[in-house]
Image (tube, grey):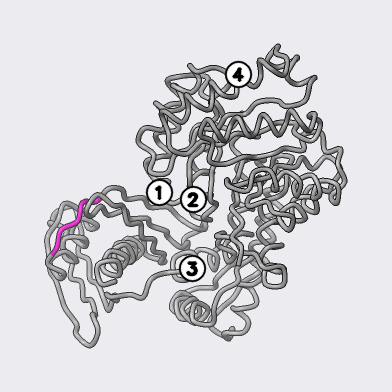
Amino acid sequence: MKNIRITDITLCRNTSLSFKERIEIARLLERLKVDTIEIPAIENIKSDTLFVRTVASFVKESKISVCAGYTPEGVSLAAAALNTAKNAEIRIELPMSPVGMEYTCHKKAPAMIELIKTMVSAAKEKCSEVQFCAVDATRAEQSFLIDAIKTAIEAGATVITVCDTAAEMMPDSFAEFVSNLKKEISDVELAVSVEDKNGMATAASILAVKSGANGVKTAVLGGVVALETMAVLIKNCGNSCGFECNIRHTETGRIASQISRIITPVNTNTVSVKTESDNAVQLDANDDRDAVAAVIESLGYDLSEEDISKVYEEFCRIAAQKRVSAKELDAIVASTALQVEPTYKLVSYVINNGNIISSSAQIKLEKGEEQMEGICIGDGPVDAAFRAIEQIIGRHYELDDFQIQTVTEGKDSMGSAVVKLREGGKLYSGTGISTDILGASIRAYINALNKIAYEEEN
């Protein structure tokens, strides 16, 4: 089965986003397991470098690719920004068409070949992974394009991307174009990037894959193949066509929607409509497993029977106290499904807190057939609860981050908590939800703890 590498260029096509918005998009793309996250060239040395390094602190699975611009100085800036990234790539993007070379770089073909050699060689000295992106490749002279690509490979490029920037080629013609190139450069990864100006980018990209391409550039919003569309297409047609990808299909729809909302904030009227839609789905303790499963599917999840059972069990716990909206069910899925097999389960907790007493927590956990109890005093109820858990397991973990928020509004709102524990230099994130924010915090801690235990046991 051929693995198609999915590169996302959303951050390159939406450069007006705030620092926080870009960070959140990078987090979501990493969670979705795209193979490469592309970032624009460093322009503001201080802020752009900080952004890349911040992304590198939590993106460990996806490759982080930074554009180097048109000068060796740009290569140095990209390399400096990427120096803490686990999986780093420097990207050299240069125009291949006669008009593009003249207008953008003020160079003729021979000088462009020298620039390619200089840029790729400089990037290779600083980073083992180098992508050469042939912009406007479909309008280049064929002989020049092949010389340019071979020059890039000889200089150290590990990935070659050819772009139909003008979107002038029909899908079958683009597939033939890729097939001919593949015969010339069979020893490196060949990816494609097709602009969707005529609505044919998806067809052109998938035919290019069938003709030998190994990767496709996508974006949630950005003028090329839609990330969600490509992921769904590979999921639905992969078996018959002989290819697959690493994308987490069960979360594609939801995460793509989240990124879209970040990029294009809805106006006040849209917010009102959306809220009414969210509240239209109201489940309660009388709804059976099939009804809950139907709503889960409508939210864009494709869960296994085992995960649906886990969600339904948690739903029943919440529904015993209140009606559950679609938004709350979404939070239940996020915190319950797609998780590791739990080593520890929460049995009960009692928290004592007040302005004239020290906060204390009594926690009971279950591990296998054994129930264990811990009682601790702490600096506040959450600290006491976390200390009680540590007393039970006999281990202390560094609390890297702790966040709490409400999922829904109102006096019976559900609380959501995120706990991040650090162990052996690695970060383990856990989430928890409850109508009680302390309960959500305890469940989040146990969720992160179970991930540590799972990794240690496997």
Q: Secondary structure at mark 2?
A: helix
Q: Secondary structure at mark 4?
A: helix
Q: Report, in whole angstroms, how far the alpha carbon at label 1 lies from the one at label 2.
A: 8 Å
Dot 3 corresponds to which residue?
332
Is residue 333 left or right of 343 when viewed as pictured? right
| Residues at marks 3 and 4, CA–CA distance in whole angstroms | 56 Å
User: Residue beneath label 1, please?
Assistant: 60
- Labels 4, 1: front one: 4
Between label 2 and label 4, give the one nearer the viewer: 4
Amino acid marked by disc 1: Lys
Q: Identify the mark nearer the N-term, 2 or 4.
A: 2
- Looking at the rendering, in which quadrant would you find the N terminus? bottom right
Location of residue 20 in the rendering, given as x and y in whole percent from the top left corner: 49, 36
> CB of mark 1 within 8 Å of CB of mark 2?
yes
Residue 417 position by quadrant: bottom left
User: Does the segment drawn in magenta span residue 320?
Assistant: no
Label 1 Cα neighbours within 10 Å, binned few <14 / some 14-19 / many ≥20? some
Q: Which residue is more in the foreground, 92 or 19?
A: 92
Image depth: mark 1 or mark 2 in front: 1
